[in-house]
Amino acid sequence: MPNSALNSLRRQPLAVVGFVLLAVFVLCGLAAPWIAPANPASIDLTHRLQSPSLAHWAGTDELGRDTLTRLLYGARISLAVSVTVVAVSLALGLAIGGLAGYLGGWIDTLLTTFAMNTFQALPGILLAIALAAFLGPGFLNLVLALAIGGWAGYARLVRAQVMATRDREYVDAARALGASGLRIFFRHILPNIVQPIMVQAAIGMAGVILAEATLSFLGLGIPSPAPSWGSMLNDARMHVFDSPHLVLFPALAVAGAVLGFNFLGDALRDRLDPRTRLELGL
């Protein structure tokens, strides 16, 4: 490994920790059908509430289902939900924030005052809970509830970045050459604002995983018997004292995934910000 890369790793140890956590999280989610030791819905009442052992590395739940298997499949669900929600929220944010920032005027006032500010005035998790309760549990309803509650933050970030970029010399040159608004946005503006959006998306992944676990814990997320981390915590709350492993392992899984994305977002911010990169010597 080159010396510059080694120096970067020494100066950003949390980035290495975040990368390792995310690698484990993504690997578990993608490879769950092949590495899981059992069927996540297989019930075995004769071996219910067993402690961790060689047969069941993370123990079994109140129905005798293998906890490690359900954790692996839960990573698959959390990964799918987080990627989908961030993709939908980012698409809405790019469209609405890009229009508001590039066109300005009454369109900016309409979209910012009556759309972004309205949604940001409402607590995102409470709005997601209300929408999920109205729509009912399910993957698509969960994605819709979380995306509606989270798009405004991306839109405000995109709007601010577009407003700071739309009057640059290279944008004026493209406009003078007759380039269309869409071509100017996607060819000249978007590539220059993608860095802060990447940081926001990485941190947003962590928020989505936490929100999905919260909604599933409340019974408003992924319905049973799907092995969601939040529903596993909900099932385990009656066995906190007699089988604490049922709470410990899903909680550690949620914490590890959230920390991984937060560490990655911080590392991206430090790496992409010129002043921070200069201070760290990256």
Image (cartoon, grey):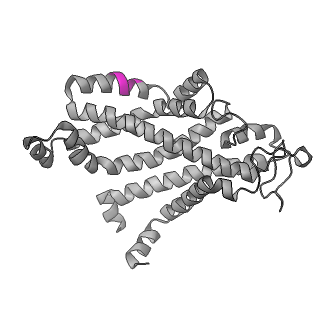
- For residue 230: magenta? no
Quarter assignment of residue 128: top right
Q: Is residue 282 above or below residue 142?
A: below
Quarter assignment of residue 42: top right
Which of the two residues, 26 or 110, is positioned nearer the viewer here?
26
Q: Residue at x 45, y 69 (%)?
A: 9
From this viewpoint, is residue 254 visible?
A: no
What type of secondary structure mainly makes up the magenta span? Answer: helix
Horizontal side of 182 relative to 250 (left or right) equals left
Quarter assignment of residue 273: bottom left
Give the residue at the far front of this rendering. 34
Horizontal side of 274 relative to 19 (left or right) equals left
**Start and end of the magenta stretch?**
114-118
From this viewpoint, is residue 226 visible?
A: yes
Horizontal side of 281 relative to 128 (left or right) equals left
Horizontal side of 242 relative to 16 (left or right) equals right
Q: Position of residue 204 (x, y in %)?
A: 47, 43
Q: Position of residue 202 (x, y in %)?
A: 45, 49
Instruction: Locate the N terminus and report the quarter of the image it occupies.
Output: bottom left
